[in-house]
Image (tube, helix red, strand yellow):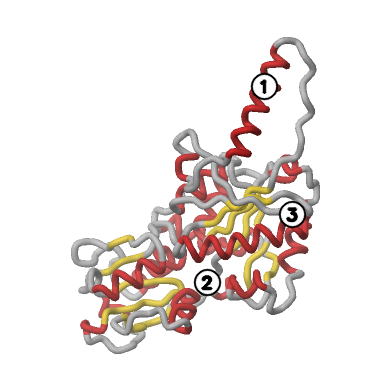
Amino acid sequence: MGARRVARSGGPEAQSLLPPLSRRALLAGAGVALAAAVTGCGGPAAPTSPGPLRVGAIPDQDPEVLQRLYGAVADALSGALDVEVEYTPVTDYAAAVSLFRTGDLDLVWFGGLTGVQARLQTPGAEPVAQRDIDQAFTSVFVVNAATGLAPSDDLTALALLRFTYGSETSTSGRLMPAWFLREAGVDPQGFPGGPGFSGSHDATLALVASGSYQAGVLNAQVWRSRTEGGAVDPAVVRYAETPPYSDYHWLLGPRAAERTGVPDLRDRLLDFFSGLPAGSPVLELFGAGAFVPVQASDHDRIEEIGRDLGLVS
């Protein structure tokens, strides 16, 4: 069966989803309502058929990039697992965590911090895999050329600049950079006028390029990808790179196997991701050489720092 990329509408959580409800979904919903009415009148209950695997991701890049990336993932997963796969875009990081917790998303590509948040809020959730590059991920601090700052490891020079992070719960765009700033003696909340939150790594680049902020931070993979593609404005200068940490990973919901009718779903997902051949379209789009197994304990440091900075309760 082919992949479908749809979204649903309705209550406050579902309103975080972007596209409107499809005609097919409307018909399916009408069928469910009719079946419920027949059962209520004494008729036999219809057997529950397996549902699609619902895939999501934190919106850390431009929507067009994400649609291309996770559309390819949905197509590849559907063919490999012989299940229907839906990719559902969401509007922000918090929505991804919330929709995973409620079971509206089964498999989500989270950053380190959002993955910890989602796992702690969803008992039974299981990490599946991460990219090889996520085992030692980094962030890049950038400045506007007008600041006159040359590349340096001295983060204290950033303290007096108008500064923006990415999303408030981004690991590479907020959590770990804030930690390294504090370790260097810089108050991560003490920038002139307070720090900004751009919402994504691409938005951070645009804001620093325009001069709206004099400095910012984003994940190193996006920085390198945009630089190699010639998409970084010359006004944006790489200033410093952080030490490595563990970051992005796939997280599987506790009810996904039962709902999709695939008892060994986690094992099959791990086999799929770890078995992708070098140069495959999915690996190319993810900017990785391979996917590798990941354990919850790999993000213990992220959880500890998140608690210390008040981002994990």
Q: CA distance from mark 1 to mark 3?
A: 33 Å
Q: Are marks 1 and 3 in contact (CB under 8 Å)?
A: no
Q: Amino acid at mark 3?
A: Arg
Observer-nearest of 134 and 153:
134
Instruction: Name the mark nearer the viewer: 3 or 2.
Output: 3
The amino acid marked with disc number 2 is Tyr
Circle 1 packing at 10 Å, graded few (<14), some (14-19), many (20+), is: few
**Residue 266, can we see it?**
yes
Q: Residues within 10 Å of mark 3 (few under 14, many from 20)?
A: many
Q: Earlier in the sequence, mark 1 or mark 3?
A: 1
- What residue sits 65% from the left and 69% below the top? 282
Identify the residue at horizontal 74%, vertical 44% (top origin).
Answer: 260
- The label shown at residue 245 is 2
Work out whether mark 3 precedes mark 2 in sequence or the reverse, and give the earlier one: 2
How far from the left and from the top, in percent, is residue 49? 76, 35
Which of labels 2 and 1 is toward the front?
1
The amino acid marked with disc number 1 is Leu
User: Mark 2 and mark 1: span between their CA atoms?
Assistant: 51 Å
Residue 7 at x, y percent in the picture: 54, 45
Q: Position of residue 62 (x, y in %)?
A: 44, 64
- Seen from the viewer's position, the closer of residues 169 and 103 is 103
Residue in view at x 33 percent, y 60 percent: 197
Which residue is rendered at x = 27% and y = 79% of the image? 144
Q: Give 137 or 187, whichever is nearer the viewer.
A: 137
Residue of label 1:
34
Please, is residue 166 above or below residue 219 in the view? above
- How crowded pointer 2 is (Cα within 10 Å; few <14, some 14-19, many 20+) is rated as some
Residue annotated with mark 3 = 266
Q: Nearer the viewer, mark 1 or mark 3?
A: 1
Q: Could you tell me if the residues under marks 3 and 2 are in contact, i.e. CB atoms within 8 Å? A: no
Q: Earlier in the sequence, mark 2 or mark 1?
A: 1
Query: Hey, which quadrant is residue 15 in on the image?
Result: top left
